[in-house]
Amino acid sequence: MKKTVISVVVPVYNEEAVIHESYSRLKVVLEGLDDSYELIFVNDGSRDATPDIIRGICETDSTVRLIDFARNFGHQTAITAGMDYAAGDAVIVIDADLQDPPEVIPEMIAKWREGFDVVYGQRAKRIGETFFKKFTSAAFYRVLQKLTDVDIPVDTGDFRLIDRKVCDALKRVKERNRYVRGIISWLGFRQTGVEFVREKRFAGETKYPLKKMLRFAFDAIASFSYKPLKLATYVGVTVSLGGFSYLLVVLYLKMFTATTVTGWASMMAVNLFFNGVVLMMLGIIGEYIGRIYDEAKGRPLYVVREELNFTRGGQARPAVVQKSGEKRYPLAA
């Protein structure tokens, strides 16, 4: 009987300090499964020794594969590439920093075997993160849920398992400004969560500083909600009504009272406020137009410089992994 194949996708960017530990822990977990597996590292243009370390691992372990980008294309694109190349019956995405514990993977697989097509990791607790990080993260997920009609689970990241049919459906979604966890929710299928404690980073620095987090948040909102565009309309109408009301007050004071309408400062303040609102709304509209421009160019989502331990055409032929100490051999074509 054909064995089930599990693909594990690990996007990496400047993770030389954690790659060996990440590989070791993932290997222990995957060796404990009664399944075949492949471990796909996607190097997203790292500038340190990350790709060299992975190349060394690939030389000694045929179940490990490397996709090396020509430059940095972004975390969500790296996840997409891993899913494009994955050959497993189930595909698991996990970051290399070990904040998402690999030891949760067997529980995800158990849920998958129960019949769920998507099993996402849900953070019950976050260790080693600041109050600001926890507060803004919680607020983001809840605001996003209010803004969109897609049911995107709160307190979840990209750590999840998806079935082969979900992976195939995801390949047909070609948008460039990607929010993968949102797209997977949009696809539908049977979904459930597995709670876990999110640990602090094993080593290295976060790849999502405040600036990137804000950009990521807006990408998520813009990808799944038109309400910011509607906000431009609402604010525009409100500001126009306010300006018209103020005009009526000025005319009344001029025509029916002796009050002199003075105040260069107040008029400038009003003008600056209105102009600021207009520019903000134009900025929101510009973000959406920019996304249309990106889609219209039709450039490839990513460019791969090197592939290791894949067969030609980029499709992996996963190794059948026996118990420790036994022979490993490739699947027959």
Image: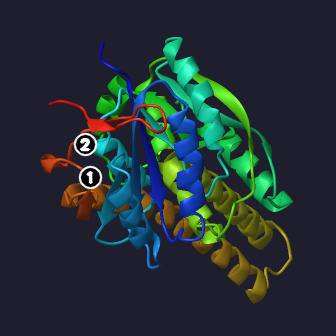
Q: Amino acid at mark 2?
A: Ala
Give the class, few, some or many, for how many residues have Cα within 10 Å of label 2's Cα (few <14, many ≥20). Answer: many
What quarter of the picture does the N terminus occupy?
Answer: top left
Number of numbered discs:
2
Nearest to the observer: residue 200 or residue 166: 200
- Snapshot colouring: rainbow
Q: Of helix, strand and loop, which one carries label 1?
A: loop
What quarter of the picture does the C terminus occupy?
Answer: top left
Nearest to the observer: residue 158 or residue 141: 158
Q: Residue 67, how many percent across, how many down? A: 32, 58
Q: Residue at x 36, y 62 (%)?
A: 290
**Residue 316 circle label:** 2
Q: Left or right: where does residue 10 sit relative to residue 267?
A: left
Q: Residue at x 37, y 22 (%)?
A: 4
The answer to whether 136 is drawn above or below residue 117 in the figure is below
Residue topped by disc 1: 309
Q: Of helix, strand and loop, which one carries label 2?
A: loop
Give the class, few, some or many, for how many residues have Cα within 10 Å of label 1's Cα (few <14, many ≥20). Answer: many
The answer to whether 110 is drawn above or below residue 60 in the figure is above
Q: CA distance from mark 2 to mark 1?
A: 7 Å
Q: Residue 301, how many percent across, how many down? A: 28, 57
Q: Amino acid at mark 1?
A: Asn
Query: Which mark sits nearer the N-terminus, 2 or 1?
Result: 1
Q: Quadrant of residue 278?
A: bottom right
Is the Cβ of the residue at disc 2 closer than 8 Å to that at disc 1?
yes
Q: Residue 91, how many percent across, how many down? A: 42, 34
